[in-house]
Image (cartoon, rainbow, N blue to C red):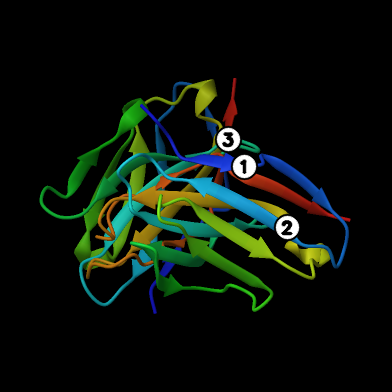
Amino acid sequence: AQSVTQPDIHITVSEGASLELRCNYSYGATPYLFWYVQSPGQGLQLLLKYFSGDTLVQGIKGFEAEFKRSQSSFNLRKPSVHWSDAAEYFCAVGHSGGGADGLTFGKGTHLIIQP
Amino acid sequence: AAGVIQSPRHLIKEKRETATLKCYPIPRHDTVYWYQQGPGQDPQFLISFYEKMQSDKGSIPDRFSAQQFSDYHSELNMSSLELGDSALYFCASNEGGLGETQYFGPGTRLLVL
């Protein structure tokens, strides 16, 4: 069964500092990988996704993520965070074999931005 | 661009009552997914439909059922509601059941008293 681990429950970063959120996955083949962001009481917004090809993917709001097969990781990065980036971030893995399979989410990382 | 529409956005029910949540996918999307997110939890996959047929099943309680209609909208029916059913229920959609990007709606917040 596939699984996702986000080791950091909370991360506090100063505004303007760089950010890295960790995500490790367990999946038998090359997975589909996603990062979603959720503001309090809101829906899930897709930041970026990896299906195949270039292992460094660019997303919205200045975010990027790198797929590392050898480490089973898909860490999210941003060079300079803004106060509006404070939110809950979820890493998710999807089934790459086709079909309408549900995503498996990590427990999420709560990002706090210090002024 | 059109997004996934969910109704109602908020719902308050008593224990043992029933509830019906509706999801209208993005136009031309034929695949719908339902997720449940408890307070402070990650979203848990419940069930999905592709071309009006159930495609994948997750941790959906037997008290819940769902279906997809000819216009591709979907309804999640919840009976004998329990306090633990209080959660945010998300619907997501995509095209072709290919397991690619799922686009999420704003969610329905259900409170069971």
Q: Of the numbered discs in the image, which one, if any, rests on residue A39?
A: 3
Q: Are marks 2 and 1 on the same chain?
A: yes
Q: Please state which amino acid type lies under the numbered disc 3.
A: Ser
Q: Please state which amino acid type lies under the numbered disc 1.
A: Ser
Looking at this view, is B85 or A13 the one in front?
B85
Residue at coordinates 58% horizontally, 35% vertically from top-left?
A39
Q: Of the numbered discs in the image, which one, if any, rests on residue B70?
A: none
Q: Can you give x and y, in whole percent of width and height, for residue B94 in the image?
A: 33, 50
Residue at coordinates 15% horizontally, 55% vertically from top-left?
A52
Q: Are marks 3 and 2 on the same chain?
A: no
Residue A69 shows in this picture: yes
Residue with the mark numbered 1: B7
Left-right relation of B113 to A51: right
Left-right relation of B62 to B113: left
Badge 1 marks a residue whose secondary structure is strand
Q: Marks 2 and 1, Cα distance to the nearest angstrom?
A: 11 Å
Residue with the mark numbered 2: B19
Subunit that carries the residue with mark 3: A
Note whether B42 is above or below A61 in the view shown: below
Q: Can you give x and y, in whole percent of width and height, for residue B36 in the image?
A: 60, 59
Note whether B14 is above or below B56 in the view shown: above
Q: Label 1 neighbourhood size at 10 Å, few (<14), some (14-19), many (20+)? A: some
Mark 2 or 1 closer to N-term?
A: 1
Looking at this view, is B44 or A113 the one in front?
B44
Q: Nearer the viewer, mark 3 or mark 2?
A: 2
Q: Can you give x and y, in whole percent of width and height, for residue B95 in the image?
A: 28, 51
